[in-house]
Structure formats: C-alpha cells, structure tokens
Amino acid sequence: MFDALSERLQTALGDVRSRGKLSEDDIAKAMRQIRLALLEADVNFQVVKRFTAQVKERALGQEVMGSLNPAQQVVKIVSDELTELMGGAGRDLVFGSSKPTVILMAGLQGSGKTTACGKLARHLKNEHGKDVAIAACDVYRPAAVDQLVKVGAQAGATVYEQGTGRDPVDIAEWALGRARAEERDVLIVDTSGRLHVDEALMAELAKIKKRTKPHNVLLVVDSMTGQDAVNVAESFAETAAFDGVVLTKVDGDARGGAALSVKAVTGKPILYASTGEKLDAFERFHPDRMAQRILGMGDVMTLVEKAEAQMDGDRAAELEAKLRSNQFTLEDFLEQMQQVRKMGPISGLLKMIPGMSGAGLGDMKVDDRELDRLGAIITSMTPQERANPTILNGSRRRRIARGSGTSVQAVNQLVKQFSQMQKMMRQLSKGKMPSLAQLTGGR
C-alpha cells in the first residue's frame, strides 16, 4: 500500500528540494502535485482539500519563508500534516481495572474480522503477556466458528463457542461469564458481519454491547475497498460508536485512501494494521512512522522493534564478536539469514531504512526466494564444510548442488561472496576501509 502515492509525493517534494529559495509559485505547483497524488490514492475529496489548504498556509508563512532551509521545512510540514491526518499520536487499547478487558470486534462480512481476532489475540499475548479468550458469536457465516477455533489455536488463545444454534447475544454473555470465572485477562468478541450496513446488523451489535459492556469497540475495515471502507466506517460511527479501527489487507494493492481518510471522516483513530496473511503480520499503527514511510524517510523505530522481537541480545553480541575475530561461519550466516526472514519481506525492510527510497533502493524488487536458495545450499553442506568452506573441492560442490536443487555455479557464487565478506571483515577489524569493488561484490 502507498507505493504509488509515495512515489508521487516524493517527486513533488523532490522538485521543492532542488530549489534553494521557494516562491509562492513553487509552493502552489507543489500543492497541485500533492493534491493530484492524494486524489489518485482515493483519499476523500474534502480531506484532500483541507489537507492541502493547511500545508499551503503553513508553507507560505514565516515558518518556511523565514527559514534557512525552506525546502526542508516544507517536507517537515507535509510529514506533520500527514501524521495529523492519520491520527496524530499513536493510541493503544484501554485495559480495564478488573478482568477481563472486553474487546468487541465489528465489521462487514469479508473484511477479515475473524482472522483479525486471532491476530489481535496473538499480539496481546506476545506483546502484553495477556491470557486471551475469544467468543465465537458469528453464527451466520458458514464455517466461521470452525475458522475461529483454528485461528484461535494458532494464536494461543482459548475459544469459547456453542456452535451456530444459539443467539449470538446469549453466546457473548455466556462467554463473558466463563472469562470472568476463569480469570482471563482479555475477552475478544467476534461478532457477525453482513454484506452491507443494515438495521439487523446494528441492532445485534447494540444488544451485544449492552450485555458485555466492552472497554473497546474496534471496527475492522478492508483497506482494499478504498472509499467504500471509509463510507462503511462513517455508517458505523453514526449508529454504533466504535473506539478505533483495525485496517486489514494493508499489504495488498491498495492506494491508501482508507488509511488517509478514515480518521478525518470518522474522528476515530486507526489502532492496528494487518500487514500480511500470517498471524504475526499485525502491528500497532503509528501515524508518524507511516507518514515517514510514505515520504521515503524510512521507519527506523519499527525496524528496530522487528529486529529486537526476532533476535536474542546475547546471541547477537556473540555473533558480532565472531565477525570481529573472523570466526563467523556459514552456519552463523544461515542463522542470521533465517532471523532476517522472520522480520518480513526484504523489500519491505528496505523501505524502513532512511534514504533507501531516495536512492531508488526502496522500490527494489528483492526475490525472497533467493534467500531460500542460499539456505538450501548451506543446509546441504556437512557441519565441517559450513565451518570451513575452503575444503569444498569439485566433487563436494557437485554433491551440494544436487542436494540443494541448484547449480555448481550457484554454490561457487555463495562461497565466493562469503569469502569476500570474511576478507572485508578482517580489514574492518584492522581499521582499514574496504574498496568499492569489495563492497559491491566486485561488480
């Protein structure tokens, strides 16, 4: 998501950056480009109008015109306003003073609500140490209860279900009683969805709210539906007040209009974003970090958090010491590669590094399967060969190529690159700077 918008905004601000001083015409031209970029991203027209008016007003003020670096100030203003547009300071859930904290999940059928329940349960368990239960109250959609039981088990959450033969309001009340008796920290209530907003959906939601008295009501919105998602959120806000939004399918080919419009239209912030199909592809939504990503400024905080979640501190220090002493083996290389893969697609990680987008590397299409091929080559080696690749003669390399389903050339390339990395680390440990050829693998 946001790829097209990010490219357009960076182009518009690139024109601004190329000028030492800025005139009113320069700013007006940039605003036109920004306006078009936002409209093409399916952002609500009124939201675009207010956004560009605020940016222009600030850009024409003393804040920019009187600064030593006006272009940098304009970029900062756009970043600030984008952050504000998506909700300002990031917000988290409200936890009750007594158990359980009740979270009511609402949304239309097909929005990814049931999967979002599992992802949220896993997030609360892993990030907050909560004992989570989920109430299966979607009794109308075929196999919804079975899906929730499966997702709940994968997330490490207990699922309370009574099949599809009972009233969902009664199931929700029964589940709350069980959660209290078993002293669960959190109860997530998965409600029924409809194909569209209607009276029956809202009436049922209102009854469940009345019986369970939730601390948080979250609306699950499919970002792929663009302005339709915003219209749905507006309808829910009017008839069944919710506290925040869970934005699903953020990794899809969406233009970003829902994320940029929903807070301005409904007044309710986006709390979480579902960024992939796997249960761990779920994260808190930080408006400031998302604004920085859109403008190609990277997202170091999220990158650090992903790394910390996957990498053991003591092991990382041990590997660093091995690198410095030139004792880093292919076994260690494989371990680090596997840890990086757990952090998500490489192309996504590149976009979080400041300057990558500006250098054209943020849009690099990195084939993650290449890492799988490298892993296959290394795992086809014996422990002795991983520890000491210099013993790899022709027959050994042919055996490894057959075992990994690759070619001898691929094995040779890996060994060569690893040898170059070791040589480079030896030079760095002696305080010497490696040559450009070494840094680029001789290309």
Image (cartoon, grey):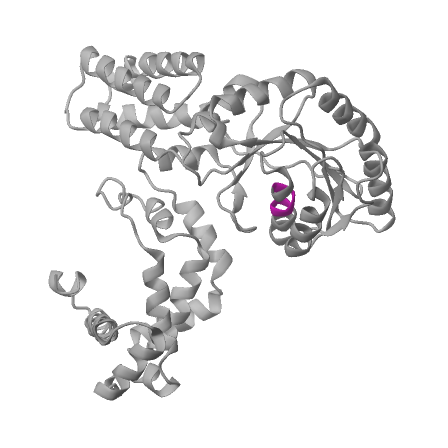
Residue 360 vertical position relative to residue 310 in the rendered view, above or below: above
Image height check: is 12 above or below 396?
above
Residue most extreme to the front: 142
| Quadrant of the rendering where the C terminus is positioned | bottom left
Q: Nearer the viewer, residue 19 or 254?
A: 254
Q: Quadrant of the N terminus?
A: top left
Q: Which residues are magenta?
A: 116-120
Residue 440: within the magenta?
no
User: In this image, 157 relative to 307: left or right?
Assistant: right
Which of the 4 image quadrants contains residue 352? top left
> Which residue shows up at 29% across the image and 27% down it?
9
Q: Residue at x 44, y 63 (%)?
A: 339
| Residue 393 visible to an observer of this rendering | no
Q: Decide if residue 353 is in sight here.
A: yes
Q: Main secondary structure of the magenta part?
A: helix
| Res 30 quadrant in image | top left
Decide which of 202, 95 is in the foreground and name it: 202
378 or 140: nearer the viewer: 140
Whether 74 is drawn above or below 397: the answer is above
Where is residue 254 drawn, in percent x and y?
Answer: 42, 32
Question: In this rendering, is residue 285 above or below 404?
Answer: above
Q: Please state if 319 lies on the left or on the right of 133 as rendered.
A: left
